[in-house]
Amino acid sequence: MSKGILYDATLCIGCKQCEQACATENGLPYDDRIADQQITSAHKYTAIMIKDDKFMRKLCMNCDDPACVSVCPVGAMKKTALGPVTYDKSRCMGCRYCMAACPFSVPKYEWDKAVPGVRKCIMCSKRVVQGKPTACAEICPTGATKFGDRDELLEEAKKRIHDNPGKYLPHIFGETEVGGTSVMLLSSIPFNLFGFRTDLTERALPMYTYQVLSRIPDFVPLFGTLLGGVYWITHRREDVAEAEAKEKEHNGGGR
Amino acid sequence: MTVPRIRFTFWKAVFLFIMAAGVYCTFLRFFRGLGASTNLSDQFPWGLWIGFDVMCGVMLAAGGFTLTAAVEIFNIKRFHSIVRPTILTAFLGYLLVCAALMYDLGLPWNIWHPLIMRNPHSVMFEVAYCVMFYTAVLAMEFSPIVLEHFKLKRALKVIRSLMVVFVILGVLLSTLHQSSLGTLYLIMPNKLHPFWYSPLLPVFFFLSAIAVGLAMTIFESSMSSKYFGRELELPILRDLGRVLVVVLALYGILKFEDLYHRGALRLVMVPGYEQRFFLLEMFLSIFAPLGLLLVPKIRESAQGLYLAAVLTLLGFVTNRLNVTITGVENAVGGRYTPKWTEVVITAMFVALGFAIFGLAAKYLPIFPEEKVHIPALHEPEARFAEVAVPVHAGD
């Protein structure tokens, strides 16, 4: 069963304990200065964004069919069966296609390091394998960040919207975006106020490239034969012309 | 081969200056990291080195497969004398692209990983394989030039008997990865501006590679005649000019149809940042060179052809930079201008390209007909007979 995270902004009190727990879990530095940063970075995998008295959480959406996994030439990015999208630096060659392709601009880079890697939330993959919730969900004092089976969380999100008319936007961000994501967000104010793209396609992004790539194995023998065939024909004509010229010479021009 | 002495020393000084700056920037890149040596950021993971060194580098090397296809596969013999310089350009181009990639990759020592860690769903994986194999194929296509120089007749015979295979492989691999550089961007439907995002991106990249291949051939023939004191093969360049007209016209019409069907045509009229760059690209890559080449007097003249070729090159360089940089700036919310160190490294690779081409032209039989008796230069038949024989040796 695929796991997921449901973040309900209306329950969030902005205590940022999720940020701190995330930093501890991933061995990242955390202090007041970092707590004030409302953006994710190579040293901050999740951030609480504040707009007046409203909150929103930014973290890797852990897409069901992630662009980063599809574009990685060496398979450093992986979508695990349980939901987390993980990264293996020992495979990475640093092409940064994952960063360019991510529709949420999640992967960050260690630009200041001589041996850099990609950094992002991996939905506490190790904990999830052990059957534990993510660090952010475990610490959340209000239940704003909830960990569970994605299907059940989706049902719950729908129920919350249905049971509380006017409280939520009728939009579960992550239900259908780019084919669905393991992380889903609920909010009372438009998502684009927090920098989320609300015009994202509902198609899984890897299909855009796969529909071209998948034709290559068929294309190669066809085009190869075509090229070989053209070569054969154009050069055959020449051999014939040469032979005819010779014959002409032999016959002394008379036919 | 008399080169004006002042010009020679001037360019030599420029070259040495760029190299010295390049060495310093290389140090910055590998000891201080990408952050210290580039303006790349989490918003702009790809900048000048991908946009120009890789995207444009591969594109500018397209003359190799365009001309070998025309001569070896379509058997258009009158282009034979200009194939070698294009193969040299292509081989050099790909080697420089690979070298430049070592600067851009975060972990360049892992560049071989795609060999054993395969993800066939990745366009980058396909590009990596094609570029790798095509560079090897280019080495094979280039090898007769070296073998001839050292008079290794037996090896030459073996290579030539296999040349058809290399040529077909080369055209196939080029077709695949020239278009794939466009396919790379298909996964960013919400990031790349509608001027450039199109399901036809691979087709546009492929067509423009052919146009650039032709323009590059005209450009380098003109340069060779200017700086190496070589006879300008004007009749050949005129023919290439005509082909260029057709390819540019096809590209232009397809571009128009594509914009029309995607409903992006109206955006052309709306003033804006992307619109300015798009119009500049359209002018340089389509309207200006087509306008020039459609005038018979200009199309027939060496200067006219040269100008049209340079405009085409600038136009499609603009296109590649628009796709990699301009087209995503709005979506990621920011502007990218390369740092001086990035510019220096790029300039270093361009300078290296010119310098190595010059050296190779000087010491290797790149223009083979000059090595045989000079009168053959003005007798196309004699020249073709000379070089066409080995090609048939393997039939």
Image (cartoon, coloured by chain):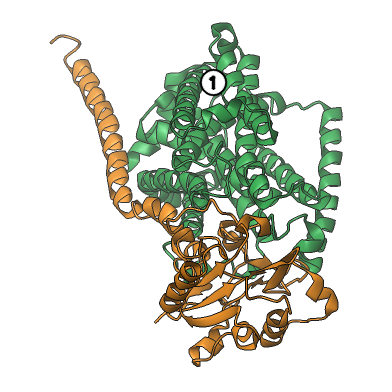
Chain colours: A orange, B green
- Residue located at (50% from left, 39% from top): B205
Position of B90 with respect to B6 (left or right) is left
Q: Foreground residue, A10 or B35?
A: A10
Q: Which amino acid does label 1 sit on?
A: Leu
- Residue B335: image location, x then y, percent: 74, 47
| Residue situated furthest top in the rendering | B297
- Residue located at (62% from left, 23% from top): B283
Q: Foreground residue, A21 or B93?
A: A21
Tell me: residue A228, above or below residue A14: above
Tell me: residue B107, above or below residue B44: below
Where on the picture, by quarter, is residue B223?
top right
- From the image, tell me which residue sits under label 1: B237
Tell me: residue B263, above or below residue A45: above
Q: Foreground residue, B288 or A6?
A: A6
User: Disc 1: which chain?
Assistant: B
- Residue A3: image location, x then y, percent: 46, 80
| Residue situated furthest left in the rendering | A255
Tell me: residue A245, above or below residue A32: above
* Quarter of the C terminus of chain B within the rendering: top left
Position of A35 with respect to A10 (left or right) is right
- Residue A19: image location, x then y, percent: 71, 79
Whether residue B309 is visible here, answered yes or no, is: no
- Residue B110: image location, x then y, percent: 60, 70
* Quarter of the N terminus of chain B within the rendering: top right
Residue neighbourhood size for the residue with mark 1, other residues' Cα within 10 Å, grouped as few (<14), some (14–19), many (≥20): many
- Residue located at (59% from left, 65% from top): A187
Whether residue A135 is visible here, answered yes or no, is: yes
Where on the picture, by quarter, is residue A50?
bottom right
Position of B320 with respect to A30 (left or right) is left
SS state under label 1:
helix
Position of B233 with respect to B243 (left or right) is right
